[in-house]
Structure formats: structure tokens, C-alpha cells
Amino acid sequence: MIINPYGKESIDFASPDAVRVFNRALLKAFYGIAHWDIPADYLCPPVPGRADYVHFLADLLASVNDGEIPRGAPVKVLDIGMGANCVYPLIGYSDYRWHFLGSEIDPTALAAAKAIVQSNGLNKAIQLRQQSNPKHILLGLLEPGERFDLTMCNPPFHASMDEATKGSERKWRALGRADPKRKLPVLNFGGQSAELWCEGGEARFVTQLIAESAHFQHKVLWFSTLVSKASNLPAIQTALKKAGVLESQVVEMSQGQKQSRFVAWTFQTKSEQQVWRERWARKS
């Protein structure tokens, strides 16, 4: 615990270890996850913000289902770049009983997520798959006949490790912890290179995801991804138009002082969306 700038005790969110312990407690108390851990230095994001993304996506599905959130195994979700923490599938299954496929390029992260899934007896609800080609996101990942109601993604936000480090320094200042006498981690919330940055940064990753999504327009109802930087939205909107998307939404989210958003898009017409929803009535 630390004393925050308001003189009250608080979790030290600049410490990945503190966030890891906090996440473990939240996942156990609210989602029934008895066993959860990740390797040192892997991304350990706070759970509440991740839960918001899942719940907003539930509302998106409800919008084409007469206001009712579809639940259970018929709802299939693809978590792109799931990470070692496996947080989205854990929350989505616990709250809505959705079934997940988590993709990942890092074998260490994949092994950690597999250990979480197995130790909690969730093998039937959460499947894992390695993307063997790091240059691709969706291409080469999906199998014939697979359909997904949603895709979700927490993309690498930065264009370089230097940019990621500077981003952490800004977060420390916002947390009131920029104390030169205190040794702080290089990256708050931890994270490996593929989790934090890629060539071209967030804009490049998301625009590539949009371009690849056009190849699977009849296999997915709603694609989505987090977007950290509002300044990237114009380029993303241009990519959506170029890909031939029929409908898109930018959904704003907030946790305390943190502002974030996700972009969702579909290639399905309104009538096709109504036909698609019939899948949710099936028993599995």
C-alpha cells in the first residue's frame, strides 16, 4: 500500500507486483477464478478496465437482440493477442458463459494462459491457439467453418520501446509517484515487447487488423479493438471505409481519470445481423 496524493491509502499502481496481487484478489472474489498468475515482466493490466470492454461488447450484441444480452456457449468470442493474463476470456466466461478462442504469438504467454485455463477447469470454455506468423493477425489463424460473434483486442499501443517507457513515466507523474528517490519499474503494469509496441504503433496494427478482417467478413459478426490514442481515429476511420465496412461505432469508456475507447465494425447488413442472432438460441 502507498499514501496517494490525497493522503489516503491506495494500491501502488506503479508496481506490477502490486497490480498482480490486486488482480488475483479481484478475479477470485468477483469471477470465481481460484488460480491465477503470470510470469514476471508480462503485462498485468488492472481488471476493472478490462471488464468494462467485455460489458460494452455485451451491450453491442444486445443491440441486435431486442436489448437482451445473449449468453452461454453459442456465443463465440475471439480474443486477439490474449496475453499471459487471459483476463478477457476469464471475465467473459464468468459473467456471460461465452466461449472463447484466445490467440497469441508468444509461446511463454500462451503456456501461462494455458496453465490458468487448466488449473481452473475451463478447458471446454476457453481454447488457445498460437498465431505462427507474427506478421499476420487473423490470416492463417482461423480454421474452416469457425464463426465468431465478437472479436476483441488490446493492441500494442506504442511504436517503440522508448515510446513505451516515456508513456510509463507520464503515468507515474499522473499517479503522483514521480519520486526520484524511489526506484520504479521501467514499465508500469509490466509487459513484453509484443504486448507493448510494434512497428508503426497502434495505428499500424489496427489498420492491418481492419484490412485482414475484410477476408473474414462472413465469419464474424462484430470485430472490435481498443484504441488508446484518439489521434489515431481518423486513420482508423479511413481504413474502415477502405475495407468496405457497412457499420462502425466508437465507444468511449472511462475508469477514474483514465479515458479509453474501442472501435467496433461489421460487414453484415441489418437483415444479416438478424439472421445471425438465431445462432444464440441454439443449445450447446
Image (tube, helix red, strand yellow):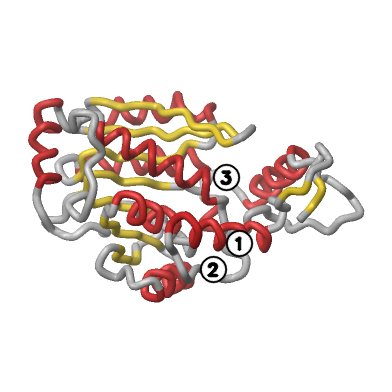
What residue does disc 3 label? 158
What residue does disc 2 label? 38
Residue drawn 61% across the image and 58% down it? 22
How far across and down, in percent of the image, does residue 59 sit? 32, 34
Q: Residues within 10 Å of mark 2 (few under 14, many from 20)?
A: many
Disc 1 to disc 2: CB gap under 8 Å:
yes
Q: Up-down: is 214 above or below 233?
A: below
Q: Quadrant of the N terminus?
A: bottom right
Amino acid type at image mark 1: Arg
Amino acid type at image mark 2: Ile
Q: Nearer the viewer, mark 1 or mark 2?
A: 1
Amino acid type at image mark 3: His
Q: Quadrant of residue 174?
A: top right
Residue drawn 69% across the image and 47% down it? 168
Count of numbered labels shown in the rendering:
3
Q: Nearer the viewer, mark 1 or mark 3?
A: 1
Seen in the image, is 253 located left or right of residue 138?
right
Q: Nearer the viewer, mark 3 or mark 2?
A: 2
- Looking at this view, name the residue that lies furthest to the front: 29
Element class at badge 3: loop
What residue does disc 1 label? 20
Q: Up-down: is 124 above or below 281?
A: below
Element class at badge 1: helix
Label whose residue precedes the other's in the sequence (1 or 2): 1
Seen in the image, is 278 located left or right of residue 116?
left
Q: Quadrant of residue 235?
A: top left
Cα separation between marks 3 and 2: 22 Å
Seen in the image, is 45 located left or right of residue 126?
right
Q: Residues within 10 Å of mark 3 (few under 14, many from 20)?
A: many
- Residue 20 in view (yes/no): yes
